[in-house]
Image: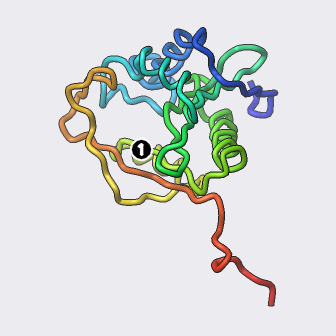
């Protein structure tokens, strides 16, 4: 499949929970995830997303699970929500065999559009396991910056996976959508 093939976006419903869990798991866990570059198989075992939490995210206000479909088939998803006056981006998953095809870039752009245009938020934040340098570099190429703010990994909460290492933590990345007026260049 070419990256320019039609891609349709829609919001998830409760009926999408099982296919979403399968998609997210395939992108991050187990041998199948090794087909793509986003695998966390060397860092974590177990589930990547909890079906109950996913249902809560679908149902709660200011929270959307975006699904990217091609020819009616789910190929990618992401969670975008409003938190602390900013957009929050997470659960970013692309079918492993489509990673690197441009699908993820287009889904990220759609999530940013929702936060920036529909919700009028000034920035998007996310957390990434700080050992994932290739993933952090992907986001940096798309305008995100490392904030230096870290958050602990939820050890002991198997809803987020079973750690294979004891040094996991998240780093907060951030992207501003709007340039403050005093920073805008004026023609001279």
Q: Quadrant of residue 129?
A: top left
Secondary structure under tag 1 reads strand
Q: Is residue 111 above or below residue 179?
A: above
Residue 166 location (% of width, % of height): 18, 36
> Residue drawn 53% across and 47% down?
138
- Relative to 187, is 127 on the left or the right? left
- Coloration of the structure image: rainbow
Q: Is residue 121 above or below residue 70?
A: below
Task: Please tell me which residue lies in front, 18 or 13.
Answer: 13
Q: Is residue 39 above or below residue 122?
A: above
Residue 14 location (% of width, % of height): 57, 12
Dividing the image into 4 quarters, which one contains the C terminus?
bottom right
- Relative to 155, is 64 on the left or the right? right
Residue 23 location (% of width, % of height): 54, 18
Residue 33 location (% of width, % of height): 46, 22
Kindly give the residue lying farthest to the bottom in the view shown. Answer: 188
Q: Quadrant of residue 148?
A: bottom left
> Residue drawn 61% across and 52% down?
121
> Residue drawn 63% across and 20% down?
12
**Total residue callouts:** 1
Dividing the image into 4 quarters, which one contains the N terminus?
top right
Q: Which residue is mark 1?
A: 127
Q: Is residue 177 above or below residue 181?
A: above
Task: Please tell me which residue lies in front, 20 or 54.
Answer: 54
> Residue drawn 70% across and 45% down?
113
Residue count near mark 1 (Cα–Cα under 10 Å), binned few <14, some 14–19, many ≥20: some
């Amino acid at each position: 499949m070419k990256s320019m093939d039609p891609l349709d976006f829609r919001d998830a419903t409760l009926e999408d929970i099982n296919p979403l869990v399968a998609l997210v798991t395939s992108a991050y866990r187990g041998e199948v995830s090794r087909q793509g570059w986003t695998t966390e198989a060397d860092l974590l075992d177990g589930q990547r997303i909890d079906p109950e939490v996913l249902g809560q995210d679908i149902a709660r206000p200011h929270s959307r699970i975006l699904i990217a479909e091609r020819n009616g088939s789910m190929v990618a998803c992401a969670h975008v929500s409003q938190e602390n006056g900013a957009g929050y981006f997470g659960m970013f998953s692309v079918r492993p065999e489509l990673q690197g095809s441009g699908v993820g870039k287009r889904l990220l752009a759609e999530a940013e559009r929702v936060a920036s245009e529909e919700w009028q938020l000034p920035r998007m934040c996310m957390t990434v396991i700080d050992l994932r340098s290739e993933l952090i570099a992907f986001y940096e190429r798309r305008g995100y910056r490392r904030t230096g703010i870290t958050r602990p990994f939820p050890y002991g909460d198997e809803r987020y996976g079973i750690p294979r290492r004891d040094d996991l933590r998240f780093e907060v990345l951030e992207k501003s959508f709007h340039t403050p007026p005093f920073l805008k260049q004026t023609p001279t």
